[in-house]
Amino acid sequence: MRAMILPAPGQPLVMADLPQPQPQPHELLLQVLACGVCRTDLHIVDGDLPARHAGIVPGHEVVGRVLATGALASRFPVGSRVGVPWLGGSCGHCGYCAGGRENLCDTPVFTGYDRDGGFAEYAVADARFCFALPECYDDLHAAPLLCAGLIGYRAYHLSGVTGGMRLGLYGFGAAAHIICQIAVALGQQVYAFVRPGDTQSQRFARQLGACWAGSSDERPDVALDAALIFAPVGALVPAALRATRKGGVVVCAGIHMSDIPSFPYALLWGERSLRSVANLTRADGAAFFSLIARHPVSTHVTPFSLAQANEAIAALRAGMIDGAAVLVP
C-alpha cells in the first residue's frame, strides 16, 4: 500500500510502499477514505514532540471503511464507515482509566504517533476506540471532527461557558472554526483572536458567527468569561488571562506550546483558572457527536491528495488554511 512516512523528525514525509496491515483480534482493517491534517501532525513532523517510532505514518483524523475485522472486533461489521481519533487505545486498568479519565492513561496508544495512522491507503485501528460517524457528513467533511472537533469540544466543555457568556478563541484554525459554531448555536458570544494582520481569518470568524474578531495583541472592550487557546504560542497565556474577568477560565487546548513567559500574579489573581487539555475520552466523543446531531456544524476543508501531504503540512504551518486540510488517498 502507499503511505507517507516520517523518516526522522524535521524531515519531509516520504511516499513508501508498505505491506497492507492485518487486524489483530480487537482491530479493524480500514480502507482510508479521508484523513485530516492536524496541528499535532505538524508537531510530530517538526520534532516538537519526541519521536516514538522511526518511519511512523502520521494522521489521526481518519475516516475509513471496514474491510475486515479481528476475531474479537464485533462492534462494526464489514462495510461500516468509522472514525479513528487520536486516542487509539488505553490500558483500561490504571488509576486514570479506572476513574473515567482514560485521556490521562499511563500507557496510552496514540494514532499516527505510537501506531501508524491515516496518511496511507489502509490502516488498522482498535474497534473499541473508533466512532460511528453521522451520515450527514461525507468523508471529507467528517475527518476534522475526529480531533479538531473532539479536542475542541473537550476544551470548550472544561471552560464551563453557558448561556450568553463571552468566549474567546485564540487561533482560528480547524478546532476554533468548529467550536465557534457550537458556541454561537448555544447562545455564547464568540471573540476570535488571530495572528496580527490576518484579516482573512478575521472575516472567516465573523462569517461563522463571531461577534468580534481581531488581532491576538488586541483586547475587546468587554472582559471574557473564558478563553480557549488553540495556537501553540505561550505568549498568548498572559494575553488571555489579561482579557478574562475575575473567576474566568483559560484553557490551553494544544498538545504542545512554546514556553509561557513570566507574568505578574495579578493576572491570575481574582480566582482566574488556567488549565490544560490532554487528549480525549470516548465519553467526550459520545457527547460531542450527540451535540452536533442537535446543533450541526459545517466543516470547511481544503482537500489534498496523499502525495501532497507535505504541501498540506506547509500550508497549515503558514496559516494558509481556512478550517482544515484533509488528505484523500
Image (spheres, rainbow, N blue to C red):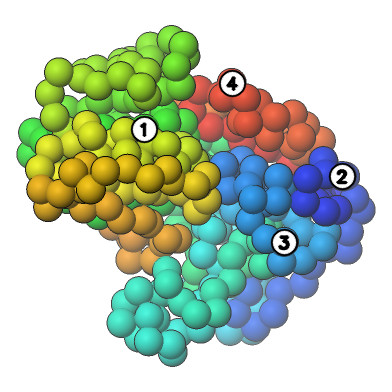
Which dot, 4 or 1, sits closer to the camera? Answer: 1
Q: Residue at x 51, y 64 (%)?
A: 87
Sequence-wise, the earlier of marks 4 and 2 is: 2
Marks 2/3 in contact by CB < 8 Å: the verdict is: no
Sequence-wise, the earlier of marks 1 and 2 is: 2
Sequence-wise, the earlier of marks 1 and 3 is: 3
Which dot, 3 or 4, sits closer to the camera? Answer: 3
Decide: few, some or many residues near mark 1? Use Cα within 10 Å; few <14, some 14-19, many ≥20: many
Q: Amino acid at mark 3?
A: Ala
- Placement of the C terminus among the 4 image quadrants: top right
Q: Amino acid at mark 1?
A: Tyr
Q: Is residue 186 above or below residue 279?
A: above
Q: Which residue is mark 1?
A: 170
User: Quadrant of the rendered structure where residue 327 is?
Assistant: top right
Which dot, 1 or 2, sits closer to the camera? Answer: 1
Q: Which residue is mark 2?
A: 14
- On the question of residue 221 being in view, the answer is yes
Q: Nearer the viewer, residue 247 or 72?
A: 247
Q: Which residue is mark 3?
A: 51
**Residue 325 location (% of width, % of height):** 59, 32
Q: Is residue 315 left or right of residue 220?
A: right
Numbered mark located on residue 320 in the image: 4
Query: Disc 1 and disc 3: Cα gap in Å?
Result: 28 Å
**Residue 100 location (% of width, % of height):** 32, 77
Q: Is residue 228 left or right of residue 136?
A: left
Query: Disc 4 and disc 2: Cα gap in Å?
Result: 22 Å
Q: Residue at x 42, y 72 (%)?
A: 104
Q: Nearer the viewer, residue 85 or 154?
A: 154
- Placement of the N terminus among the 4 image quadrants: bottom right
Sequence-wise, the earlier of marks 4 and 1 is: 1
